[in-house]
Image: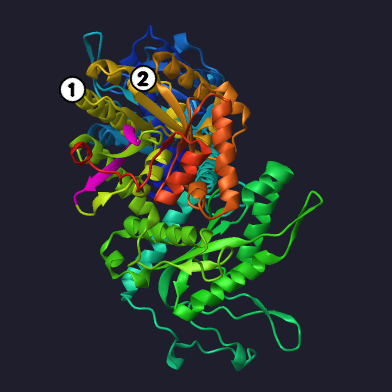
Amino acid sequence: MQGGSTHATTSEVTAPRSRTITSTAVSTVVSTAAAALDEVGEDSCAATAVKDWWQHSPCPQLVLDPEAATVLSANETFWAWTGLVPNTVIGTSFARLLPVGDRILWNTHCLPKLESSGRVSEVSVQVTGAGGARRAAFLTASRLPATEVRGASHSGRVLVALFGAAERRLYEEDLLQSKRRAEASEARRARAEEGLHHLAHHDPVTGLLNSRGLQAALASLLFADTAAGQGPGLPAEPSPAALPKLPPEIPPGSQPKPGSVMVTEVVEDGTDRVAPTATPTGYPTVFFVDLDGFKAVNDSVGHAGGDTLLRTVAERLRATLRTETVLARFAGDEFVIADLVATAADVDVICRRLLDALAEPVLISGVEVVVTASIGVALCADDPGVHLQDGPARAEALLHRADAAMYQVKHGAGRAGTGGWAVHDPSAADPAADRLRLLEQLRHAINDGQLRLHYQPRIDLADAVVGGVEALVRWSHPERGLLSPAHFIDAAETSGLIRELGAWVIGEAVAQAARWNAQGRRLQVGVNVSARQLSDPTLVSVVTAALARHGVAASQLVVEITETALMLDPEAAAGNLRQLADLGAQIAVDDFGTGYASLTYLKQFPVHELKIDQSFVAGIAEDPADRAIVAGCIQLAHALGLTSVAEGVETAAQRDVLKELGCQVAQGYLFGRPQPSEALTS
């Protein structure tokens, strides 16, 4: 046996682990390629690609028959490495390529091991190439699994891979580069995911958390609060034992309260100093900050100026807060702060510091903008029931309560009025929630027959005869009793539910007119039409259908509108009013004198009645100014050929003055309160 063969046996036994791993990886890759070649077939595109990869792989490779005796094929790398040509090798014994000593090693060591384990790893041999030149290499052989291609069975052939020192180094470098490329690709992917996560959770204008990021941060804060077992009840002042110990360089007078927001403060010598940051203790608290008049800023300095203001506000808020405090731009001009607060007194201190931080004017495009804000505060400790909810529900509840408190500030209910702050009271009514609940109940009321119409008589002053009525809707609420329109009309108007409500009123009023007609009492019935109804393209069809369904003449219907409704969408209003007038319906302008409509509208629109508002009628007997205004309205109506109607007549003196001034129709408590149709008939 030659020295090379002896070295081969020793090399195989003592091969370093790193080298064995490398050759195993190579063998695995090559085996997979050869197996894939069998599976895809000779004619497919995939077969061509696999063949090309195998032919030009970094190491020489041969495929032997199942007995590992005869060479069936070899790749281009083998022919280039040995200098041999296929017709001298294919179909011949593989052992002929090895020197005598290595043939013995192949037959006595490699073949038995290949037979028993299906694999031989890193045997050091020499391969005889063209001209008898010997080339040192590490031999690895693997038995491929049996395959079946096009119905023909192929028993397990043997794949032999040869690694010369140079080829091995190139291959290892190639593997190393592949690993580095994979690692670089993974790093880029991780950075991309991190960037996308940041974009998904942060506001692009201010860089703060957005609403999604806020939800996650607030849920985390609430989870920590739950884990700590905080119970309800916020103390008015902290106990001395709860105060954190300060470093020696911090004077005792500046010791913070637990959970307080730490800000830059001015000390006695007039210098600025950042107050110490302590680990907060207390209860999760949300501050909902809404900038006052932000739309006006956008309108005056543009959206770019508005973004500049938002960034400035974000910087000032961040500078005021602890590093760990959650700060987010919730939406538009709304910011949310979440932190642990220890005492009720701390809330006032925090809000005052926030407002002071924002009070410094901001110069934007040469315009000095003074920022004020309204702050709503919700304390988790104020609502013990919130502890029973899961994290997302608790976070949503806190935000909603803080938003409700901010809404109260906007309407002057805050500690400092508009531009101040208010702490949410869980026992107090929630206007937003109450409104949603009211609308849901009203929707059911329309469908479930809870609405009623009451009728107030209209008197012809000349003969004191009831010539018509005004229909006024009432809601027979199952819990709150009989509700006047003041409790629900505004909500219905702003929500769009006014269309359904208005259609019901028109239908029921026309139906009652038909019942009175059947009793021999022909009365005009007035119905109020809101601004949204007046611009609704279905209004005319609703009226037409009601009149046709009940067989009532259009002249018996008086459509009452306000000056404000005329002004909101004059073009749509004019179209609907003309069509109603063409049907024969009467058009009345209600509450005349309280709106801002131009008198030219009285000429442009097909108006038949002018109803003088009760605020002028109330003082007509005592106040010369009111008398003059009412007289002017009556004269204007007559000059335009309109019927004059006075509302809110409560005394005989008022009635007498109206008759003296020539008013034609009056209604009010003097003649009758709004009442059900049965009472009016009796």
Seen at 35% across and 36% down, the residue is 464
Seen at 57% across and 25% down, the residue is 640
Pick whichever of labels 2 and 1 is earlier in the sequence.
1
Asked whether, in this view, residue 475 is left or right of residue 209, the answer is: left
Asked if residue 640 lies in the magenta stretch, the reply is no
Type of secondary structure dominating the magenta stretch: strand
Asked whether, in this view, residue 386 is left or right of residue 490, the answer is: left
Q: In the drawing, what numbered circle is on residue 627?
A: none
Quarter assignment of residue 37? top left
Task: In this rendered view, identify the residue nearer to me: 496 or 116.
Answer: 496
Looking at the picture, which amino acid does disc 1 mark?
Ala
Dot 1, how many residues are within 10 Å of its Cα: few (below 14), some (14-19), or many (20+)? Answer: few
Seen at 44% across and 78% down, the residue is 281
Location of the C terminus (image quadrant): top left
How far apart in space, not on screen, are marks 2 and 1 (Cα)?
16 Å
**Residue 60 percent location from the top left of the image:** 48, 25
**Residue 296 percent location from the top left of the image:** 66, 48
Q: Is residue 511 above or below residue 228?
A: above
Which residue is labeled 2 in the image?
555
**Is the Cβ of the residue at disc 2 closer than 8 Å to that at disc 1?**
no
Please provide the residue range marked out in magenta: 464-478
Q: Secondary structure at mark 1?
A: helix
Q: Secondary structure at mark 2?
A: helix
User: What colour scheme has been applied to the protein in the rendered image?
Assistant: rainbow
Which residue is labeled 1 in the image?
518
**Residue 244 percent location from the top left of the image:** 50, 87
Looking at the picture, which amino acid does disc 2 mark?
Ser
Asked whether, in this view, residue 603 is left or right of residue 376, the answer is: right
Task: In this rendered view, identify the residue nearer to me: 398 or 651.
Answer: 651
Residue at the far top: name it.
43
Location of the N terminus (image quadrant): top left
